[in-house]
Image (cartoon, rainbow, N blue to C red):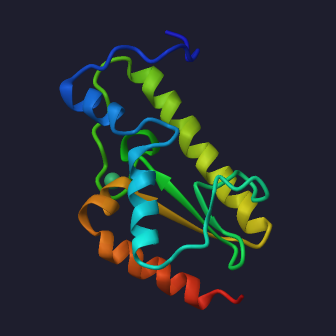
Amino acid sequence: MTAKLGPPPPASSAAVSRSMRGNAPKGTQPEIVLRQLLWSNGLSGYRLHWRSAPGRPDVAYPGRKLAIFVNGCFWHRCPHCRPPMPKTNVEFWARKFELNVERDARKTRELEDAGWAVRTVWECQLRCEPDEVVATIREQLGSLSR
Ligand SMILES: [Zn+2]
């Protein structure tokens, strides 16, 4: 089997298809959850997919140079909840995940090289500990110089 990337194969299990639905790449639900959290906690002033920041991070605070990526656990291979690997089409998924993780690392590097602080918020953190997510972002914004 070659590693050529076509459309994703059918989900191998209910759990996997659930993860996939919850992690669509654009305008994802976790991203909306984070936006609402930031807004309702008075942490406004962010830009979404700001073109002037390398990699167009999901959320950017240009004044403080803080970039935030909101990652779906399944697609970006969350180190906290470690979603299960699909059991079929293993090579396809392994390659796909590898590319996602590489892209994440590249964007982080590009932002850091340009003087940005980079923060990754995971979908499961938004679900299980939204208050901590907000508190650490607030802290980070406060510690970055204007
Ligand atoms: Zn997770």
* Residue 133 x %, y %: 38, 72
Q: Quadrant of the C terminus?
A: bottom right
Which residue of the protein is positioned furthest toward the left in this rendering? 14
* Residue 7 x %, y %: 50, 15
Pick the residue in front: 95 or 140.
140
Q: In screen coordinates, is 51 left or right of 4?
A: right
* Residue 100 x %, y %: 55, 40
Residue at position x 49%, y 86% in the image: 139
Seen in the picture, residue 88 relative to 37 is either above or below; the reply is: above
Pick the residue in front: 30 or 107.
30
Which residue of the protein is positioned furthest toward the top in this rendering? 1
Q: In screen coordinates, is 2 left or right of 121?
A: right
Residue at position x 54%, y 82% in the image: 140
**Quarter-wise, where is residue 91 in the image?**
top left
Seen in the picture, residue 25 relative to 138 is either above or below; the reply is: above
Seen in the picture, residue 17 relative to 144 is either above or below; the reply is: above
Residue at position x 33%, y 62% in the image: 125
